[in-house]
Amino acid sequence: MQALHALQPLFSSLWVLWFFLLFGGILFWVLRPSRRKLWEERGRMVLRDDDDNSGREGRS
């Protein structure tokens, strides 16, 4: 049990490192240049009229 208490600072540091790597990976995945067109389209989605989407599938 004392071995775990001795390793606690190491585990805390690894947790912080894991968090930043995960956060950086998510940022890279979302902000990569190949997804720019998708995000621009989604950004304009709120401003569209309902008539613009009348021909899309899935509408009732």
Image (spheres, helix red, strand yellow):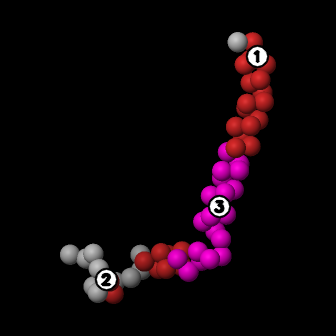
Three-letter amino acid code of the residue under disc 3: Leu
Q: Is residue 16 above or below residue 27?
A: above
Give the overall secondary structure of the magenta segment.
Answer: helix
Q: Of the two numbered discs 1 and 3 on the same chain, state the one appearing first in sequence.
A: 1
Image position, residue 4 (x, y; %): 72, 19
| Residue drawn at x 71%, y 48% as measured from the top left | 20
* Label disc, if present, on residue 12 of the rendered structure: none
Cα–Cα gap, marks 2 and 1: 61 Å
Q: Residue at x 41, y 75 (%)?
A: 46
Residues under labels 1 and 3: Cα distance?
A: 36 Å
The mark found on residue 3 in the picture is 1
- Label 1 with label 3: CB-CB less than 8 Å: no
Is residue 39 shown left or right of residue 12?
A: left
| Residues rendered magenta in the picture | 19-38
Residue at the farthest top position: 1
Residue 21 inside the magenta-drawn segment: yes
Whether 7 is among the magenta residues is no
**Real-space CA distance between mark 2 and mark 3, rounded to the nearest whole angstrom:** 31 Å
In the image, what residue type sits under mark 2?
Answer: Arg
How crowded pointer 2 is (Cα within 10 Å; few <14, some 14-19, many 20+) is rated as: few
**Residue at numbered disc 2:** 56
Label 3 sits on a secondary structure element that is: helix
Q: Circle 2 — which element? A: loop
Tell me the residue at 65%/71% (across/down).
Answer: 32
The picture places residue 59, in percent across and down from the top left corner, at: 25, 76
Q: Say whether disc 2 or disc 3 marks the residue closer to the N-terminus.
A: 3
Task: Determine the image quadrant of residue 53.
Answer: bottom left
Quadrant including the N terminus: top right
Q: Residue shown at 54%/74% (left/top)?
A: 39
